[in-house]
Image (cartoon, rainbow, N blue to C red):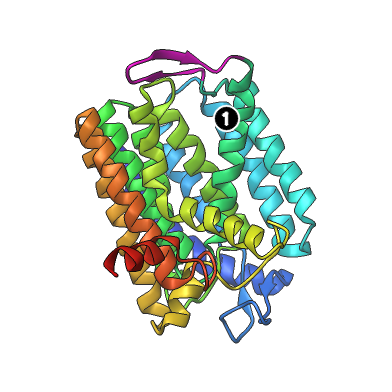
Amino acid sequence: MLFLAIAAALVASIILTPLVIKLAFRIGAVDRPNYRKVHGSIMPRIGGLAIFGAFLIGYAILLPKDEHAAGILVGALIIIIIGFLDDMLEITAKAKLAGQLAAAIIVVTWGGLHIEFINLPFIGQFDFGYLSIPITIIWIIGITNAINLIDGLDGLAAGVSTIALISIAVMAMIMGNGFVVATAAILAASSLGFLLFNFHPAKIFMGDTGSLFLGFMISVLALLGFKNVAVVSLIIPVIILGIPISDTFFAIVRRIRMKQSITAPDKSHLHHCLLRTGFSHRQTVLIIYALAILFGVAAVLFSQATVWGAIMLIVVMLISIELLVEIIGLAGTNYRPLLNLVRMIGK
C-alpha cells in the first residue's frame, strides 16, 4: 500500500504541476527578475501547490496513523496559506513569521509534539522542562526558513529537500517509525515529481508556497523521528539537514561580521558562492546535491557508530565544513581563521 501511495504522489505531482503553471500565469503569481535573482524571465512561482496537492493524494491513499498527524496537517495548511499569500502579495517578513509561529504552536499544542528530554553521554537524562515547547518551536521555524533560504537556483530546494526526506525515511525505517517513513516517502515522491519541471532550466518555481511547506514538514518529521532519545540520535536530523543549516548559520555569521541585520538579503549564500567560483548553474546544483547526499550517508554512519566513533565523525565533518566555508567565502571573503592557522603552522 505504501508503494501505491508513493507512486500516486509522484504521478499526481507530474500531472498537477503543468496545471499549476497555467494557474500561476492566470492569477499573476509570477516571479519577476531583479538584481538578487539569477533568472532572466518571468516565472510562475506557486509550484508548492502541486507538491502539496500530490502529497495530500498520496497521504489520503495510505492514511498513516499517528497521534500527532492532525496537528501536523493543520500546521501544514497554515504554512501553505502563508506561502501562497507571500507569492501573490509579497507579505511582510513579520507576517510570514507570525504564520510560521502559529503553525508551530499548533503542532506543539494540538499535535502534542515537542522534545521533552535527551540522554547525555556520561551524564544521563536531561529534562528540558518549560524550555521544551520554545525549543521545539524554534527548531520548526528555524528549519522552515533554512529550506526557504536555499531556494535560490532551479531545482535546488526541491532536490535538497527530496534527499533530506529520503534520508529521514531511511533513518526512521532503521528506528522503526512507520508514520515518519510513510509520510517522508510520500512527500519525497511529491517533491521529486515537481523537480522534473523545476530542474534547470526551470519551467516553474516552488515559491514560498513550496519552500516553506517542505521546510515545515522536514522540521516536523525530523523532530518526530528522533525526539526524546540520546543526544547522539538527536544530532542525526542536524546532520541530515547539514546543507540548509550550515548555509543559514554562516549567513548569520556573515551578516554579524558585516554589521548588517541578520534578516538582510544578500547574494552570498552557498549557491551564490559556488556560482562566483566559476561553476555553472547546473553544476552548482549538482554539487550541492552531492553534499546533501554525503550528509545523508554520514547520518546513517553516525547512527551506527560508537560514541567515540560518532564524536570523531562530527569533528571531521565540522573541520570539512569550515574549510569549505573559508575556501568559497561563505562567511565573507576575509574570513579564514582555519586556513590562516594552517599557514602559520606550515611556516
User: Which of the image's four quarters has the N terminus?
Assistant: top left
Looking at this view, is 322 or 336 the one in front? 336
Image point (34%, 63%), residue name: 289
Query: Does residue 201 show up?
Result: no
Q: Residue at x 31, y 45 (%)?
A: 315
Vertical position of residue 231 compared to residue 247: above or below? above
Q: Residue 54: horizontal and vertical position, in percent?
A: 47, 51
Q: What residue span does the magenta drawing correspond to? A: 116-129
Q: Quadrant of the C terminus?
A: bottom left
Tell me: 217 left or right of 252: left
Examine the structure image and report whether residue 126 is included in the region drawn in magenta.
yes
The x, y position of residue 314, in whole percent, is 31, 43
Residue 76 placement (x, y as % from top left): 59, 41
x, y percentage for residue 251?
Answer: 57, 60
- Residue at the front extreme of this rendering: 347
Q: Is residue 77 left or right of residue 327?
A: right
Q: Residue at x 41, y 38 (%)?
A: 183
239 vs 230: above or below? below
Q: Is residue 321 above or below residue 202?
A: above
Say which residue label 1 marks.
136
The residue type indicated by label 1 comes to Thr
